[in-house]
Amino acid sequence: VYQACELNVDTQMNLDEDAVRHLVTVLKSRVGDAIILFNGDGYDYRATITHVAKREAAVQVHEKALPANESPLDIHLFQAVARGDKMDWVIQKAVEMGVQSITPLFTVRTGVKLPEDRLRKKMAHWQKIIISACEQSGRSRLPTLRQAISLNELVQSDICWPHSIILDPHHGQSIMRLPQYTQYNIFVGPEGGFSDEESSMLRQQQCLSVQLGPRILRTETAGLAICSVLQARFGD
Ligand code: SAM
């Protein structure tokens, strides 16, 4: 259960409103139940529920430990912003698949236009999705939601490019022949794909083109597909 505050061992604390709702409506928790709290600092805080009512709950925190369910593989997903609520779905599944960061990308063919205020609201909404996906999948390390950025700007920034992959339905090496690294940066194109200029710009940055198979996947399927193959081959 996520708590946006400092957590300390050997303390009794009241949980915030969202956490209480999660305990009461989702987990149906009772006094004496063991729970794990997290605040994004990378640790599990093991606790026991000491009080629970409709709108309030308290816990005793008794142990701080490193989570045992983080993958040894660092996957950073650069996902072209998809229409409607598809981006919500991609973010939720990426967290479940153990990624370390998600960067929403604007590309030439991205059909979604988000003025600054709507983008700010979307980012806050996506951050909430990350938190609830962590709660659901038992992750205590919150993946980073990086600031949404255009692909052009990103290429000019100081991102670390080694082991970057551009998912390309038409060319590239098979995912099954990809060498083993400890980190992968994965670029997934929008519904209309990356433009030729964008693909060659990424390839000039040493991005490797990778194909996931003979069928064209929806943008919201492609990132999930590669994450599951990478975790199965090289991660956890
Ligand atoms: N009409 C676009 C095209 O032909 O490139 C289709 C784009 S596809 C719906 C959206 C994105 O998902 C692509 O830009 C690519 O990054 C990824 N993708 C979909 N199927 C793929 C496959 N079989 N192999 C690798 N990447 C794929």
Image (tube, grey):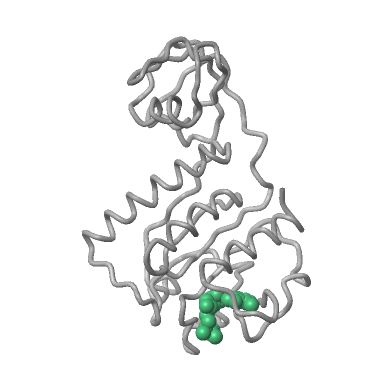
Does 106 appear above or below 31? below
Does 124 appear above or below 21? below
Q: Position of residue 191 (x, y in %)?
A: 46, 77
Instruction: State which quadrant residue 185 falls in.
Output: bottom right
Q: Residue at x 69, y 81 (%)?
A: 214
Q: Position of residue 153 (x, y in %)?
A: 38, 73
Does 161 appear above or below 111? above
State ligand 1's quadrant: bottom right
- Is residue 209 at least partly visible in the picture? no
Q: Residue at x 40, y 81 (%)?
A: 109
Q: Is residue 145 left or right of residue 235?
A: left
Q: Position of residue 32 (x, y in %)?
A: 54, 11
Q: Residue at x 67, y 74 (%)?
A: 212
Q: Is residue 207 left or right of residue 108?
A: right
Q: Residue furthest bottom?
A: 196
Q: Position of residue 203 (x, y in %)?
A: 57, 81
Q: Residue at x 23, y 67 (%)?
A: 115
